[in-house]
Amino acid sequence: MVVHQHRRRRGRAGEAVVAVGMAVTVAALGACGGGGGSGGAAARDDARAPRDPAAAIRGAVDGLAGAGSARARTAMEMATGGTRVTIRGEGGVDFRKRMGQLLVMLPADVTGRAEHRPITELLVPGALYMKNRGAGVPDDKWVRVDTTTLSDGNLVTGGATDPLTAVELLRAAQGVTYVGEDEVAGTKVWHYQGTTDIGLAARSASPGVKEALEAAAKGFSKDSVPFDVYLDEEGLLRKVRHRFTYVKNGVIDVSSTTMLYGFGTPVTVALPASGDIFAGKIAD
């Protein structure tokens, strides 16, 4: 994984990004019209795109359970004041068992260290487990966070939006328009843009995600979340990018991207024993 950090100014702004970014440190097919000449082939391809984009996106959410599991890559870019930080992760998600695992890398000087070990995150309904969290937590211990108590519902806290939650947000897709044909990691896809509503998504979200989204609906300054979605020829969701606005010690703009690939790849998530979970006070 490669982590990029673009720093224009350090100080309190950077600390705000750390505090929020990781809690660990922390239509319509109108554009599909035909034409003559070289546009004919594109028109034929576009005609294969769903006629109801919003319904196709919502259907893709349910379709992931049929796929079973997938590998995932995440990227979260946070900007506040003059500081911009990008945190990347990689792992896998089991959409049937609703569990996942990510290895998340922090930029080096976010923590004030020359290097920081990757943070292992286990994602399960209602909870986030983190290892190598730092900030006073022993190296051999896990931290457990109840995501239903987080003001962002773990859309931002873990430094990577839980792919399960990112997908469930799309259940309230609205105002969706077809952008055009594109490519994601060598796979032909159809690109859509629209918005979702965190509160509305919470009402129809799957158990375990519903409560976290209800918390997020209260914590974000705006319920409306713009998104870009990329579906492949089989209707599988290959990529989703959300843009959040979060207020905590200032306004923080967050762009969170999840890419899915390797569908059907087995994903095993082993939760830590109770004795391996840190019970002490966690530093901010």
Image: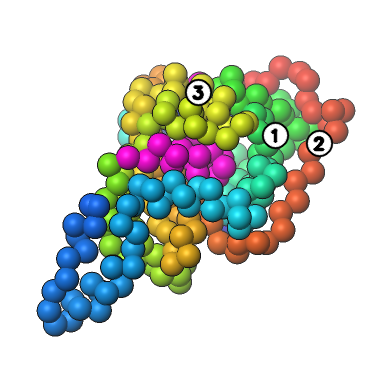
Bounds of the magenta segment? 151-174
Residue assigned mark 1:
129
The residue carrying mark 2 is 272
Q: Nearer the viewer, residue 239 or 103?
A: 239
Q: Quadrant of residue 116?
A: top right
**SS for callout 1:** strand
Mark 2 vs mark 3, foreground winner is 3
Q: Residue at x 17, y 71 (%)?
A: 34
C-alpha span from label 1 to label 3 = 20 Å
Q: Earlier in the sequence, mark 2 or mark 3?
A: 3
Three-letter code for the amino acid on which mark 3 is drawn: Glu
Q: Which residue is mark 3?
A: 214
Graded by Cα atoms within 10 Å as few (under 14), some (14 to 19) or many (20 or more), the crowding at tag 3 reads many
Work out whether residue 263 or residue 282 is closer to the camera in this orientation and state it. Answer: 263
Is residue 155 left or right of 71 when viewed as pictured? left
Coordinates of residue 254 in the picture (x, y in percent): 40, 37
Q: Is residue 177 visible?
A: yes
Disc 2 vs disc 1: Cβ atoms closer than 8 Å?
yes
Q: Residues within 10 Å of mark 1 (few under 14, many from 20)?
A: many
Secondary structure state at the residue bearing disc 2: loop
Q: Which mark is residue 74?
A: none
Residue at image position (71%, 17%) is: 281
* Vertical side of 255 occupied by 66: above or below: below
CA distance for labels 2 and 3? 27 Å
